């Protein structure tokens, strides 16, 4: 697995401008089978997120204009809205919580009203301590 690309930009640069040729070479290295983007980025002194952004931008620029516009239309809205749902119980849903606990030879069966599930959970925690 070969991950490094020749001609890394000068050392000591914090915020660099990379040549188009360097970007193409690094992105081409990412396309090799069995090579991870993170490994290529690390081997070339790049942040993996920066390299992923270059790849996304190059992929996006190759799409026709109509495809780019339609993909933007699929973006989720900035704000989401809560939509309450009514849950209907069926005859198959028990009206009670049924619990069986066994300790040694003792078996305890408990039926708890479904509306008090929180209290039931507290009771079970206390019993199991």
Image (tube, rainbow, N blue to C red):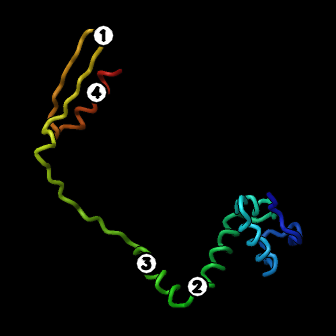
* Labels 2 and 1: the sequence-earlier one: 2
Label 4 to label 1, Cα distance in Å? Answer: 17 Å
Q: Are marks 2 and 3 in contact (CB under 8 Å)?
A: no
- In the image, which disc is placed on residue 124? 4
Residue 19 seen by the camera: yes
Q: Secondary structure at mark 3?
A: loop
The residue that mark 3 highlights is: 74
Q: Are marks 2 and 4 in contact (CB under 8 Å)?
A: no
Label 3 to label 4, Cα distance in Å? Answer: 46 Å
Name the residue furthest bottom: 65
Label 2 to label 3, Cα distance in Å? Answer: 15 Å
The residue that mark 2 highlights is: 63
* Labels 2 and 4: the sequence-earlier one: 2
Q: Are marks 4 and 1 in contact (CB under 8 Å)?
A: no
Label 2 to label 4, Cα distance in Å? Answer: 58 Å
* Labels 3 and 1: the sequence-earlier one: 3
Q: Position of residue 127 (x, y in %)?
A: 29, 21
Q: Secondary structure at mark 1?
A: loop
Q: Residues within 10 Å of mark 1 (few under 14, many from 20)?
A: few
Name the residue furthest left: 91
């Amino acid at each position: 697995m070969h991950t490094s690309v020749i001609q890394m930009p000068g050392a000591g640069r914090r915020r660099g401008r990379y040549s188009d040729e360097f970007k193409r070479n690094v992105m081409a290295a990412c396309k090799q089978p069995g090579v991870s983007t993170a490994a290529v980025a690390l081997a070339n002194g790049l942040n993996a997120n920066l390299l992923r952004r270059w790849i996304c931008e190059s992929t996006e620029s190759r799409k026709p204009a109509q495809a780019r516009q339609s993909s933007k239309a699929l973006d989720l809205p900035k704000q989401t809205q809560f939509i309450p749902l009514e849950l209907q119980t069926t005859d198959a849903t028990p009206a009670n919580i049924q619990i069986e606990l066994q300790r040694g030879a003792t078996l305890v069966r408990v039926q708890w009203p479904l509306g008090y599930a929180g209290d039931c959970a507290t009771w079970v925690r206390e019993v199991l301590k």
